[in-house]
Image (cartoon, rainbow, N blue to C red):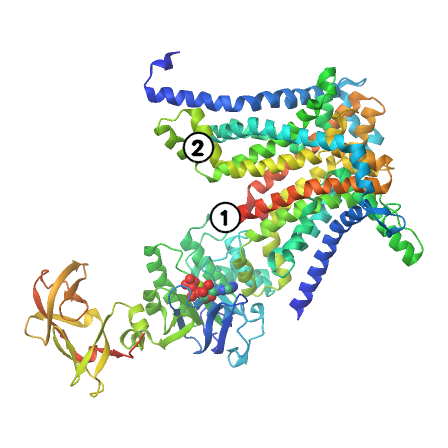
Amino acid sequence: MNVIGDHGASVRVETCGKTFVDGTRALEPATLDIARGETLVLLGPSGCGKTTMLRIIAGLELPDVGGKVLFDGKDMTSVPIEKRNVGMVFQSYALFPNMTVADNIGYGLKIRGVGKHERASRVAELVALTNITGLENRRITQLSGGQRQRVALARAVAIRPGILLLDEPLTALDAALRDRLRGELNRLLRALGITTIYVTHDQAEAMELGDRVVVMQKGVIAQVGTPREIYFEPNSRFVAEFIGAANIIEAPVENGQLLLPGGRQPIGGDANLTTAVAMIRPETIGIVAAGSAPLSGTIDSVSFIGDRQRMIIGGASSKIIAVDAPNTITAKAGERVGLLIAPDAVRLLPPGN
Amino acid sequence: MRDRLIFTGQLLFTLTVAAFLVVPAILSISAGVTVNYFRGISSGVTLQWVFQVWDLYAGTILLSFVIAFATLAVTLLVGVPAAYALHTHGGRWSRIVEEVITLPIAIPGLAIALALILTYGGFGEFRRSWLFILTGHVIFTMPFMVRSVMAVFSTVDIKTLDEGAASLGASPVRRFLGVIVPNAVPGILAGALMVVTLSLGEFNLTWMLHTPSTKTLPIGLADSYASMRLEVASAYTLIFFVMIIPLLVAMQMFADREQGR
Amino acid sequence: MQYGVLTKGTVVFMSHKSFVWLCLLPLAVVTTAFFLLPMARLVVVGAEGPQGLAGYLAILTEPRYRATLINTIVLAAATTVVTLIIATVAGMFLQRHRFPGRAVLIAMLTFPLAFPGVVVGFLIILLAGRQGLIGDLSNRLFGEKIVFAYSIYGLFLGYLYFSIPRVILTIMAAVQKLDVGLEEAARSLGASPWAVQRDVVLPALGPAFVASGAIAFATAMGAFGTAFTLATNIDVLPMLIYTEFTLAANFATSAALSVGLGFIAWAILALARSFSGGTVAAAG
Ligand SMILES: Nc1ncnc2c1ncn2[C@@H]1O[C@H](COP(=O)(O)OP(=O)(O)OP(=O)(O)O)[C@@H](O)[C@H]1O
Ligand SMILES: [Mg+2]
């Protein structure tokens, strides 16, 4: 019986949709498979149905008829949350104000009838693991936001859940603390090896924590993939623009080249294309002397960010193009420059949307 | 399935409680318009009891209204400025004053009435007039007005408004009438509804303070309960309901609207 | 006054200050003249009986008074407990479910809010009196007329009648403020519906229980109208004070008893407030 160890369950969400009693269609029927021990991140803008999906998996909402939730292949759809053995961390933490930190962490164990001594030792273990030593006897109101977050996590993990569910656990914290806790959380999740489903609307969080990321849009799963896949190979304009910065260029194609006002840009893919929607990440574009690249434009503005500089280029395409250039290049607004883009850095998106 | 059962159980329980509260009122209303309550509603429906009550007790109804509105006037004139002063001044003393004026909610009306009689019972004219009852009602209802207005003051930033108006050169009196009072209107209305409702139904104090020539509606009610036939007493109660229920509904709607904001 | 020579701003400030005092003046006058002075007089009269100051102890030493006091406290306590239970079950239900007719049900449960005690007494008579509904029904069903309006049970029922609406409103407001997340968290940790109620919901409602319970208790202690209407053979403190004053013309005793009654009612409320003031601490 160790905190660290592999006690995850696999999860399958089968055609789960959700229509609320007031008629709101929060989730279109969706199917997802989450492997044992995997960390899956649900990512999407506000109101896209992330929480709804999480609550269906938790057992706090019932999916619409036809939907099923399976843990380790066992149908859990009609099992209430208290019997599902899931650990949950809420955005507001939902710590019990009438109990101390230790009582909060030990609550699930107490409910399970774990004896006092065993409970105390397990609570101590978790207190150490989550770095809150010394706070055991405090009341919740006497904790800072970051400390509360740790207590909430410790409480959820204490019951050795098969699945850990986190709903924007870091959103309530300030930026610096969020960054630090994100790293800590990442190490902890890896160490625990529990199957984890993590909801966030912050793409950086999703990238760092997720083995796979599910991008959602208006109740629909837009794409599922590793962070790399969804970053470099988005399958839609929505995903491309939601994850990181993206230049989206719509232009006619001739002989495998985009016809742009600033020149011709070679692209891979189907040679018979006549028009394309292309996505190019700003950091994949190289700034070179005008004329030494097939595509050129004029620098509209340069903003120095420190580790890099963001250049806005006009005249190359019908819309401006953003470029993340190394901070060593010196170029001023008004200068004409060449834009060097490798053909395989150009990702073709399906037309429309 | 289990949820369904729990839901039904709770619903039935709540319905029973509601029935306990509503059925007697319905009994009373129906008795007030029944020819003979013994024989039941089949004996016929009549307004004769209502008219009889009107003949016997119209004076009490009138007096109740006079006292209720006089109480309202006094609590407005005294309570609203006081609420402003207590809010503006703040601090320990304000809290003590608030505490003292709130005491009449805690102390039974009977005790306050006794105190008033023992102190002012010797002033014959005053003792015999309805003003004596008015003093009791004012003391009893004042905390409701003051607190209701203060509650509004604590949600709108009265200090900034006041200072803003002052910076424009308005005198304290003009600021109070032109800026403070208009902003306190929701609290004043809620307090006013409460004051009138409480005054119309006040019995504990009034029973001790009244004289044969200063009977209010609840006094008349007690009188009819003791000495009149059931139908008359019920008809009288019916009249009381008709007066008080709109006020209660208004109060409820007000509370809902406040909550909705 | 030397302040007059200060800058204009200070003068405005001063006059504002005196305006604030002016605003408070009417209240000070009214409260002093018609509340503080009379209450002081009441306290003095209480000590003017044949026993002097010891008259205040009579409420505890005189067997008849003591029995009445105990009666009143037991009745008020029973009313409080039963009202809290009823109001919690109904209030929680109404706040947590949406169904057709809910608004009507809430209106029905809260409309007796400002019914005076006399009217409540009369309604209890209609329910459980000699010509009451319960007697009528029991007569038809069992051939026996059940009449209890004029006993302590009738009084108890009457006190329930006017306590329930008040307490339900407070409880509903408190339930609305409950964080549903807390209950979900408890469930995710494996707590059964009962455990959730015991460990999360009831502790969170604690302050509301204390506050509304104290009001129900204090009101029941001092309620006079209902006892007055139901009159026969009930000994509660307000009735005792009333009879001592009007029938026995025993001013000193009735004053002493009133002071005692007033003190108990006030103390209960003050105590409750100091408890529910430190909300979280009390909930533990
Ligand atoms: N109980 C409910 N009843 C009705 N509609 C609801 C309910 N809960 C959520 N919704 C709606 O369902 C949609 C999806 O909500 P959900 O909470 O899943 O969004 P989310 O992706 O978690 O957003 P956020 O990032 O803001 O938390 C929203 O339009 C929301 O308004
Ligand atoms: Mg959400």
Q: Residue at x 91, y 57 (%)?
A: C140
Left or right, A51 with respect to A299, comes to right
Q: Nearer the viewer, mark 2 or mark 1?
A: 2
Q: Residue B232: percent from the left, percent from the top?
A: 83, 40
Left or right, C8 with respect to A54, comes to left
- Residue A167 visible to the viewer: no
**Chain of the residue that carries numbered disc 2 in the rendered image:** B
- Residue A105 visible to the viewer: yes
Q: Earlier in the sequence, mark 2 or mark 1?
A: 2
The residue where tag 1 is placed is B261
Give the amino acid at mark 1. Arg
Given residues A86 and C165, the one toward you in this image is C165
Quick one: label 2, few (<14), some, or many (20+) residues within 10 Å?
Answer: some
Left or right, B212 with respect to C140, comes to left
Determine which quarter of the picture holds residue A130: bottom left
Give the amino acid at mark 2. Val
**Looking at the rendered structure, which numbered label has been put on residue B179?**
2
Q: Residue A24: percent from the left, percent from the top?
A: 49, 67
Q: Residue at x 38, y 26 (%)?
A: B170
